[in-house]
Amino acid sequence: MKKSSSSESLDAAPPETSRHPSFGEAFLFWLKLGFISFGGPTGQIAIMHAELVEKKKWISEARFLHALNYCMLLPGPEAQQLATYVGWLLHKTWGGIVAGAFFVIPSIFILWGLSYIYVTLGNLPWIAAIFYGLKPAVLAIVAAAVIRIGSRALKNEVMSTVTAAAFIAIFFFSVPFPLIIISAALIGFFGGKWKRDKFLVIRGHGKVPQRHRSRFLSDSSQSRRSSCRCEAPARDPETKQRRTQS
């Protein structure tokens, strides 16, 4: 039984420290995420990528980027949808419920508190200065998040060109967002057929050891299968002749 060379080229060093989190660990992470998810969807997605993919290694980068692509197409808040999906991957139904709920519940209380301060004390100069000082900080968070996610997704000049064209279309020409999404999807569909090396650029963490395969959420565990070529054993001519005679 032989493995194809293309499968070997996709496999990297296995994630030795990867492990499946307990429900309690995941619960504490989603609770913390609800308190620190500043910067809007872009900042929230960057935080999840840094924690789930790079630091904790609970999910592969390929699975994360694929899920992000699907959530961007769905109506509604894509960051919360992504968190719900990852929670479901980790602990099924209850994992998705906890991730989706605690993604927004802590921020509700933070929003109430900030709104109360702004309404009651917003006319004070030092309070107004604090809120104005938060603006560039949030902008920096968003810019860092765009660079972080973009550096993972834009692997070649074709991806960068599509990104630049989408930005020019929506910023300078006010092209409707659904039209940009449909155009990008068509470009990806036909480009994946004609130039697969330029469009199929998302890779996972690689081959996972057998002891981690049921626990590590790697894209290779479901979307990639090692192609095997099984050769039938050659029969001895004398044995074949004896069977024919019998």
Image: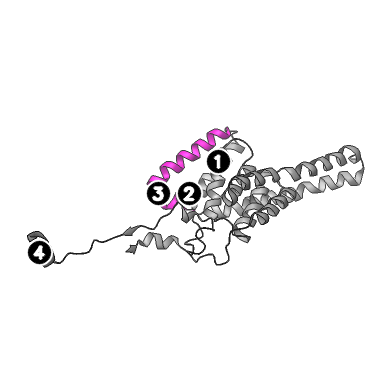
Name the amino acid, label 4: Arg
Viewed as shown, does residue 111 lie left or right of 121?
Answer: left
Task: Confirm or deny contact between disc 2 and disc 3 (CB under 8 A).
Answer: yes
Name the amino acid, label 2: Val
Counting the numbered discs, the total is: 4
The residue drawn where x is 87% and y is 43% is 128
Q: CA distance from mark 2 to mark 4?
A: 63 Å
- Residue 158 has which mark? 2
The residue drawn where x is 55% and y is 41% is 166
In the image, the segment drawn in magenta is 176-202
Name the amino acid, label 1: Ala
> Residue 3 at what x, y percent from top left?
35, 62
> Dividing the image into 4 quarters, which one contains the C terminus?
bottom left
> Residue 150 at what x, y percent from top left?
58, 51
In depth, the one of 216 and 162 nearer the eye is 216
Please tell me which of labels 2 and 4 falls first in the chain. 2
Task: Confirm or deny contact between disc 4 and disc 1 (CB under 8 A).
Answer: no
Residue that carries the numbered disc 1 in the rendered image: 166
The residue drawn where x is 68% and y is 52% is 27
Please tell me which of labels 2 and 1 falls first in the chain. 2
Name the amino acid, label 3: Lys
Residue that carries the numbered disc 3 in the rendered image: 195
Q: CA distance from mark 3 to mark 4?
A: 54 Å
Residue that carries the numbered disc 4 in the rendered image: 242
> Residue 141 at what x, y percent from top left?
70, 51
The residue drawn where x is 89% and y is 40% is 122
In depth, the one of 179 and 11 nearer the eye is 11
Q: CA distance from mark 4 to mark 1?
A: 72 Å
